[in-house]
DNA sequence: AAAGAGCGTTTCAATAAGTGAAATGCATTA
DNA sequence: TAATGCATTTCACTTATTGAAACGCTCTTT
């Protein structure tokens, strides 16, 4: 059982991914992306089109309604947590600090839905289910849509004294789905370092919903995702 | 060109739909849903699994991360408008009143992103892009997460005098994506009628992200979706 | 305990079904 | 005008999909 995979289906799903990644793509581009002949790509895209997974819009293929529907059904806090897991792990590994994922709650607050404790003996600690206000916290500001164009928020010694929180939004379409953040004891991080960390968190937040979990499924486990974030020297 | 469709891919997508619709499904159930033999369903589901579109969780197949990612990328106001189009049309057709779709804006307000004018000569009117406050309006209350368990909100003579607004949330996973509403001149609708309308709007709002656009693609145009909403007698 | 039912899984021969090169017509560009 | 690139169609080749059958397994029933 070397591979129990159906090539045709794999190719069709590859095309579907190409269409969604690019947003709008011509047949030729899609075929190139998936390394398929034009005729094969055409046939498969037509299948995807007839099932509503893509739609054709003036010689360009775009994501269809079906993919939105299925994605919407599958989207949940649980799936967000799963998707963010790798990013959280990477943040902890590269900074040694605690990393968190927050979503808006019903009552104008935010709640922690995923936690990764840092590795430093002195570290920030929180727990899943904890509520945070939308003002005075980095994650809260992000959830409130107050993230500036740089893509991240830094709050030094806000509601929680002595800690610096760095948060970035996880966007889903044009809506804020969650806030990814790293919280550091303030004495351990300078302002420039906080900016570097901000860029790192923002990049990870972006990647959560944009980078496929594994581009090449054949490549077994143990492969880190490409495009590694430059490690920040988190020294005292 | 009777059908330029790839059967294998169609079947795989059918299975994907079955998994997402049911949330968690056994191989045998998925095979039954898609009218496939167990061995074929197994092979296709494994392909979907290896590409991340479904995941296997203790003998049950569940939606995978890939579908969430692609759906998230494809989700936009534009796609919401497309998806809600049929529901809006149906509401207008069955009630004669104006129907709207609202989403939260950045500034704690809501905005109209889709409009269908009613057919009565005396009707409520609004326009795409118009802002509404989150308090004092039915759509606003829905967007603020204040919809009661019955699934809809009725506001009689709120911010806008002389009109009755009925709104229901369009849920995406566990989050409110939009508000679907019908606005009626108050003199034309009694309170019991408003409740009936509320159930109708709630049902349509639910269906926006849960009913496939067309279950059988082969069935040409001109077919109304099954499960018709009982028409309400919107007489004076 | 034994028999039965249902499930997930594997195997395998039959052939249905997908494949890609080549050709076509149509734009756009040089 | 010639050339390039694209979307599309056709078609012979054969690859890759298919489903029945068989197996081991776990429950449930008798």
Image (cartoon, coloured by chain):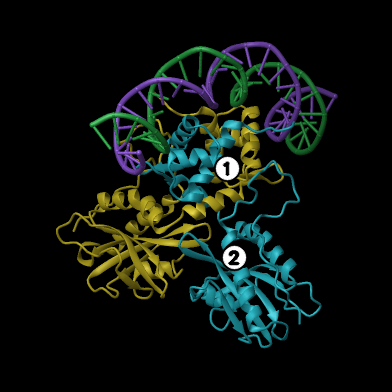
Chain colours: A yellow, B cyan, C green, D purple
Relative to residue A44, is residue B70 depicted above or below?
below
In the drawing, does residue B113 fall left or right of residue A77?
right
Confirm or deny contact between disc 1 and disc 2 (CB under 8 A).
Answer: no
Residue A150 visible in image: no
Labels 1 and 2 in the same subunit: no
User: Could you classify mark 1 by the number of other residues whose Cα lies within 10 Å: few (under 14), some (14-19), or many (20 or more)?
Assistant: many
Residue at the extreme left of the image, as rendered: A121
Quarter containing the C terminus of chain A: bottom left
Of badges 1 and 2, nearer the viewer stands 2
Residue tagged 2: B203
Residue tagged 1: A19
Residue at position x 48%, y 50% in the image = B22
Residue at position x 47%, y 52% in the image = A74
Secondary structure category for the residue under label 2 = helix
Q: Give the image location of residue A154, x and y in percent.
A: 34, 66
User: Could you classify mark 2 by the number of other residues whose Cα lies within 10 Å: few (under 14), some (14-19), or many (20 or more)?
Assistant: some
């Amino acid at each position: 059982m070397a591979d129990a995979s159906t090539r045709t289906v794999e190719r069709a799903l590859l095309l579907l991914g190409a269409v969604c990644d690019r947003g709008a793509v011509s047949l030729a581009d899609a075929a190139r992306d998936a390394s398929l002949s034009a005729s094969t790509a055409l046939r498969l895209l037509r299948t995807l089109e007839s099932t509503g997974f893509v739609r054709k819009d003036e010689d360009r293929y775009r994501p269809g309604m079906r993919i939105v529907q299925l994605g919407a059904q599958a989207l949940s806090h649980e799936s967000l947590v799963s998707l963010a897991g790798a990013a959280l792990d990477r943040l902890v590994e590269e900074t040694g600090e605690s990393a968190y994922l927050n979503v808006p709650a019903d009552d104008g607050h935010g709640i922690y839905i995923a936690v990764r404790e840092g590795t430093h003996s002195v570290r920030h600690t929180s727990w899943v289910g904890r509520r945070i206000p939308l003002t005075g916290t980095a994650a809260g500001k992000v959830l409130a849509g107050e993230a500036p164009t740089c893509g991240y928020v830094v709050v030094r010694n806000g509601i929680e004294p002595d800690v610096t929180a760095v948060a970035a939004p996880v966007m889903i379409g044009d809506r804020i789905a969650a806030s990814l953040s790293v919280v550091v004891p303030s004495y351990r991080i300078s302002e420039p370092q906080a900016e570097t960390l901000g860029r790192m968190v923002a990049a990870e937040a972006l990647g959560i919903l944009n980078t496929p979990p594994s581009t090449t499924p054949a490549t077994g486990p143990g492969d880190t995702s490409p495009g590694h974030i430059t490690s920040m020297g988190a020294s005292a």
